Image: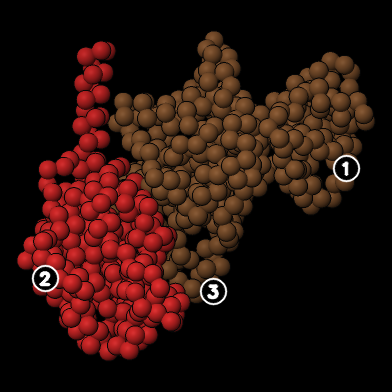
Chain colours: A brown, B red
Amino acid sequence: MELVFGNHAAAKAAIDAGLRFYAGYPITPSSEIAEELSAELPKVGGVFIQMEDEIGSINACIGAAYADRVALTATSGPGFALMQEGLGLASMAELPVVIIDVMRGGPSTGLATLVGEGDLLMAIWGTHGDHPVIVVSPGNVKEFYIYTQKALVWAETHRIPAVVLADEVIGHSYQWVDEWPEPIKIPERTKERVLEIFENPDDYLPFATDEDGHVVPLPPIDAGIKWHMTGSAHDVDGFPTIMPEKVKRLIERLWQKVWDIRDELIDYEYLGDGDADILLMSFASMGMSAKQAYLELKEEGYKVALFRPRVLWPFPGDELADIVKKNGIKKIIIPELNAGQLMLLTKAFLADKGINVEYVGINHQYGEMISPDEIKEAVYNG
Amino acid sequence: MVKKPLPYTHTEEKWIRDRYLPHQWCPGCGIGMILKAVIDGMDDLGWEPENVAFISGIGCTGRSSGYVNAHTFHTIHGRAIPVATGIKLSHPELHVVAMLGDGDGIAIGGNHFIHAAKRNIGITAIIVDNSIYGMTGGQVSPTTPENMKSTTSIYGALEPPMDPISLALGAGATFVARAATWNPVHMRQIIKKALEHDGFAIVDVKSQCPTYFGRYNGISDPVELMNWYKEHTYIMKDPSDIREGKLPLGIFKDDKSKVELSKKYRQLFEHLRKEGENNG
């Protein structure tokens, strides 16, 4: 057993996965990730740089992702807002960057030192245009380790930017970790993989697709293969175009990217006996509050279930719909530290499946957690 | 191999992606002259395209990277320098060149510009300084001279222009120079020295935009506009050679004593590696 500080678990995850580049700008409550990596990355030959702002940070990460491999930055709401432009570039150029957003109360400077969870929709749709992004959300310190690594590996493998939505409670908690899982490693870029698709290196097209329709891998930069990229709408060669059929092909493919690989990504915790009337559902640290409420309510004999998505985009709409149908859920209670962002997504995806249940939101937007007792209260009040 | 139409020099064949030509710059624009000077400089230095990362931002100058046969990236407005920073730090063996416009480099990208200078990161930043936002239709830029007109300063610019040279010197850049397209020989010499420099090098190149800057100020003929720049600039004897109302051209600073940032990182890695071996 080891007592671990949340933000340090994220830093450890990155080192164990083989991260080689971090650029960031200090912001509460994420700064301990930067502090830890500034000490640890150089020991393994990795670059830590503190940039002039969050815009510089994400763009330096994009440069490192272009030349080397997936890069990492960590921030909180105000910094994440500044990174949205860069997140769009990473989506469009299909370069792997991972942003850890340790959420705090907003809007604006908001509650700098207190917890909030109001960045969910910004993580999915914060940058303009229909773009691909993977959004994961750990519920505790150990999961912060696991899902930071998954985000790094998925981003590099699929050339999609990824966001890790933690929050102040997770980032600033000391929690017991029984044992660390076997680390998963960021894959290396190899010339061989590229030459399996392009016989002649001079024919390399950075935005071509393989026979399964997935974007081709990036070569190592020292493999003698040169390519062009742009944030403008482009053809498969990376050169800007405004030809409607080419732009259509690009944007549709980009939007479809996370849905094409959803089976690999979808990840959630579901607890229940299959006969529940009420489903408790949340993400980030409030997911654990909901879990505690679930455990206590079960103990007390209530017919409840728990659904805690750890990948929020692509949204696990199909899986949630199955659970609701199989149980015969009549009511979904969503405690979250915002005005109802997870609620909005849930309603949209379930309505799409023709599911009609009662929804109850428990919403705090003032820096205080929602306790398991408060969630139980909502169940008691039936 | 597609047969190249004439007239291409050996250098152009090696460095230009001719499948994307003709380029999209207006007749009489200075960007092509500056790009040619950069390419010739890289070739003169014996660089190979495989060892060059050529990064640009957005705007007319942003389009330059697409035409260059190297590792190229047409990034977003103002962000060429931080992207180039990430590339240089992760692959220090690459020669990294960033070609910026004046708005791109010192307005929207100003914060990145001064911090790259402060860091002495090994990037050669070439500012195509035409005192106008060309791609967006001729708006006033940070280097538009006072009282000059543009589509957003039709009564004349109220603000004085910013001087990229003073800005770079104040921020600690180790190579700082200004050139102008009206004197291509001098410009090529300076750009080559900037490329050769091991540290953050910046060349502010005064360049003509006859389409907007020229047209809105009654000098739409490119040759006349280059003559206007010639009248308003001079090749300085040394940095103390100040002439009232005119901009000096030449090298303001060339300090080779400072260690380039990616080298400092490598020194740190080596130090920590040895320390780890001794402790382990």
Q: Are marks 3 and 1 in contact (CB under 8 Å)?
A: no
Q: Residues within 10 Å of mark 3 (few under 14, many from 20)?
A: few
Tell me the kind of residue under disc 1. Answer: Val
Q: Position of residue A30 (x, y in %)?
A: 51, 33
Q: Nearer the viewer, mark 2 or mark 1?
A: 2
Q: Position of residue B5 (x, y in %)?
A: 22, 81
Q: Residues within 10 Å of mark 2 (few under 14, many from 20)?
A: some
Report the residue at 45% width, 25% height from top: A12
For mark 2, give the secondary structure.
strand
Tell me the kind of residue under disc 2. Answer: Ile
Above or below A15: residue A231 = below
Reading the chain from its start, which is encountered first: label 3 or label 1? 3
For mark 3, give the secondary structure.
helix
Residue B180 visible here:
no
Report the residue at 38% width, 38% height from top: A50
Q: What residue is pinned by disc 3?
A: A244
Report the residue at 43% width, 32% height from top: A34
Chain containing the residue with disc 1 = A
Q: Is residue A27 left or right of residue A285?
A: left
Chain containing the residue with disc 2 = B
Q: Is residue B126 left or right of residue A217?
A: left
- Residue A357: mark: 1
Above or below B188: residue A220 = above
Q: What residue is pinned by disc 2?
A: B235
Tell me the kind of residue under disc 3. Answer: Pro
* Residue at the farthest left position: B237
